[in-house]
Each structure stands twice: as C-alpha cells, then as structure tokens.
Amino acid sequence: MIKNFSLGAIFLFILITPLYSQENLQQRLERHVYVLASDTLEGRGLGTEGRLKAIQYIENEMREMGLQHFHEGAYFHHFDFKVGLVNLKGKNVVGVIPGTDPVLKGEYIVIGAHFDHLGYNKTANGVTTIFPGADDNASGVAGILEIARLILTSGEQPKRTLVFIAFDAEESGLIGAEYFVNAEKPFPNKAIKAMFSLDMIGMLSTVTTLELKGWRTLDRADELLALAQERNSIPIKGTSPKIERRTDTWPFGSIGIPAIYVNTGLKSPYHKPEDTADLLDYEGMAKISTFLAGLTLEMANSASLEPAKNFNANVAVYGKPLKFGAQLGLGNSFNRHPEESFRAQGIFAIEAGLYGSLRITRNMELAISTLYDLNGSTTPYFGGEFRRQSLTVPALVRFNILSLEDGLARVFAGAGPYFRHHLDQKLSQESFLIIDQLPVWEFPDQEWGYSLQFGFQVSRFMLFFDWRNALTKPFSLSTRPDLEVYNRNFRVGFAYEF
C-alpha cells in the first residue's frame, strides 16, 4: 500500500510539474491562496490536520524553488508553547537565500508572513463552519513565496542574506515570531537589519494603495523607496515610523529591529467565514510581490542598512518619552470643616485643558496638567452657592501598577501637589443677603493642595479618577480666624494622547 502510494505521488508530481512551470506570477499566487484557504486545510487552526498540510505545502514550495535550509538541513524552526492548559508544538517554516558579499552576508533581512488562522467551529448538531483566512493570511504566505522565487530567478544576487519565514501561531499572540526572536539560531538578532511582515495583501484594487507601516524606522527610507519605485512603481501610503503591534512586526520592532507591516487594509471579511480565495485581487498581489522583490534587492545590496536615528526599542514599546494630550474632568466640589463635622453639599464641577507627561523609568512618569476649572461649594446660608473659576495645575507622579509587556495597556496610580489660581470668585445672591449682616469674608486668590489619582489607559485613551484636597482655606472670617474649612474635589476624567 505504501509502495503504491509513493508511486502515485511520484506520478502526480511528474504530471503537474510542467503545469507549474508554465504558470505566471499571478497564477502561482492564486494557486497558493486556493490551496491554503481550501476547506481541506480546516482554517489552518492549531491542532488541525489542515495546519500540518499547510506546513508541508510551504516546505515543498521552498524546496522546489531552491531556497536553502534554515538550520541543520531542515526548513523548520521548532518551538513549544502553551495556550490555556494545553501544551502545543509550533513550527515556523524557514528558507534562506544566502548573501554573496563576504562581509554583508552576515547581515540579514527577514521577510515573513503568518500561515495559521482561526480553524473551524463545530456546533452541537454537527454543523462545521470553517474560517478559510484567504486574505488573512494565505495572501501573505503566497507573497513571501513568490518574492523569494522572483529574487531567485532575477539574475541579481543579494549581498545580504535573505530569510523567508512562514510564522506559526500568530493568531494566538504572535507566538511564532516571538519564539523566533528569542530562540538560539545561526545568527544573532543584532544581525537582522530589517524585517517585513506581509499580513493581508489581497485587496489592492479596493484600497488602491499599499501600506508600509513602519517603513521610516529605516535610515535612508525615502532613498530606498525611490529606487524600488524606479524598478516597479506602486502607490504607497502609511510609511510612518511606528511599529504595528497586531502582527509579527512587533517582536522584532520591540527590540529595536526596523520592522515594516505590509498590507492592503481590513477590506476583506476579517476573521469571518466569508474570507475566501475568490474575493482576492491576484493581479494586485502580483504587483505587490514584484514591487517588494525589487525593494528587498535594493535593501540587500545597499552599502548600509541601519535603523533611523530616531528609532529605538524603548520608543517602539513605550512611545516617546515626552507626550502631550487633552483631558476633560467631570465631578463635584464641596467645602468641609473637619473639626465641626460640617460638610457643605457638593456642586457640579468641570475642568478641561492640556497635559504633558515625561517618562522617568519604565513604570514611572511625571504628568503636569493646565486646566480651566469650575469649582466651589454650597454655603450654609439658605442654599447659597460659592463658585470659582480657576486655573488649576496638578503635578502627579504616576506609577504603573499593571502593564502589558507591549505597553499597549496599563493600570496606574498617582499622587502629587496641585496649585490653583482663582480667576473669579462669586457668592450667590441668597448668600449676599445674609452675608451683608455678617463680618467681612476674605477670599484668597490662590490655593494649594494634593491630588490622588487612579486610572486605566488603552492605546491613546485614558480613564481616571481624581481626588483633590486643599491644604489652604477657600475663605476666612474676621470673627473666626480659627475656622478650618477646606475644599474637596472629585473628578472622573477622560484624556486622549496626541
């Protein structure tokens, strides 16, 4: 039986090899996607036979086109990982085009795309729903395979070594890319000069432009891009110096390696069963692959390939050391007499303004705000009100209580002094009627106190809770110089980081 199967496989290979050789670039890209996104591959989910078929298909393609083994005579980078309580074995598929320059061949460019997807769901009544992941990310895998083939058949020999990786377990948290970065391998991470992640490149005709997010993490980025455009022009957008956190660029970028996210956006049915092979723009994918092959060769043969001077890992993970934003706070304000157990009823208070923050350490920052603040208190005189318009400047030292490793979200607490300069102070008419019969009241135009803060931040958005307690009096009475009354404030705040 095994002998018959082997003979059949050999016959099939002999039969279809001439057909493959007659395919053009667009047809090869389409074939890759239709195979990887077929129902027989079960959505390429963890634990499925379809995922193993995808690995075998990618390995066969790398071998057939002539990519060299990654390590110890194999195309695989193995790793063990855990999802929930389940221990799993991962497998990145890796092929290499060695560099030809005696010196520069020790520098590497990684061109990667994740091959895994969401697998399938099965209901209690036996209905199976497959998530084929044609654009996400059979399209990216097809792209790296054909970029490699284009370079191998171009007649140009790259001076730097090119590493083509189909990453496993991206959908479970960028696990394959993270393990590749952290694992022992034939070269150190510092030798990796740039990295591409092709993730969803199948909708060029819909969006009309190709995004290269993170492109300006490279030095001489505009010059290299212009050289590639001279080879094969394509509309480009989004060449910012920011590393994308949601794809395999992140494990590389977070340690200071320039990492570029290549995509045509979320125009396909993202993470839905409808993400099928028939929806993709294969002509557009051919244009993208041809452009990226030229770009890769320009980078591989450049005299130098270094990170941009303003790019470093700390900025990639935690953002710029100095940040600015806008904030709004809503809450109440009241006066309290601690010795006589007097507390006036609170009145509505609101504040708005700008803030700046300076990162001191990984988990500590100094934040200073400048706020226009409406505050005050009711009075004990027939429902009168004492209202103030103030310029409030809190200075807080914030500490991260909990933060994600990639810096995308955190829980923090802060404390520090505040200063208020009162622009206007008024008593309501009801209070004046009574106050005219009382000793003179004096209202200082400044206030000092301390603030406590607790909050949450996700990406650029922040929600926090502020408590402010004055240490100076809001007023004084000539007949009661010993009177101790202090203003208290509570705010629910919202902020957005620019």
Image (cartoon, rainbow, N blue to C red):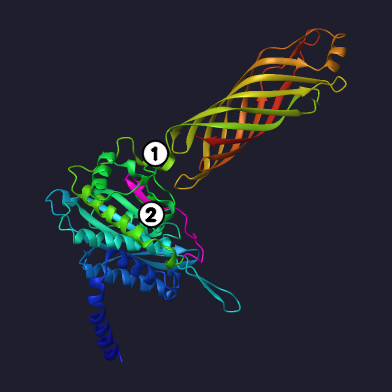
Residue drawn at x 41%, y 48% is 244
User: Is residue 267 shown in magenta?
Assistant: yes
Residue at mark 2:
248
The quarter of the image holding the N terminus is: bottom left
Q: Amino acid at mark 2?
A: Asp
Is residue 397 positioned above or below 87 on the image? above
Residue drawn at x 70%, y 26% is 488
Q: Position of residue 208 (x, y in %)?
A: 40, 51
Residue drawn at x 25%, y 88% is 7
In the image, taking residue 100 as reference, residue 36 lies left or right, namely right
| Contact, mark 2 vs mark 1 (Cβ under 8 Å) | no
The total of numbered circles placed on residues is 2
Q: Position of residue 156 (x, y in %)?
A: 16, 55
Query: Which of disc 1 and disc 2 is earlier in sequence?
Result: 2
How far apart are the two marked residues, 2 and 1, measured between alpha carbons? 18 Å
| Segment colored magenta | 253-275
Q: Is residue 232 visible?
A: yes
Mark 2, secondary structure of its residue: loop
In the image, taking residue 244 as reference, residue 350 lies left or right, namely right
Q: Mostly what secondary structure, the magenta segment?
A: loop
Q: Residue 177 sits in which quadrant? A: bottom left
In the image, taking residue 401 as reference, residue 37 lies left or right, namely left
Is residue 68 positioned above or below 322 on the image? below
Residue drawn at x 46%, y 44% is 407
Mark 1, secondary structure of its residue: helix
Q: Amino acid at mark 1?
A: Val
Mark in front: 2 vs 1 = 2
Q: Residue 475 versus residue 213: which sits nearer the camera?
A: 213
Q: Is residue 183 visible?
A: no
Q: In the image, which disc is placed on residue 315?
A: 1
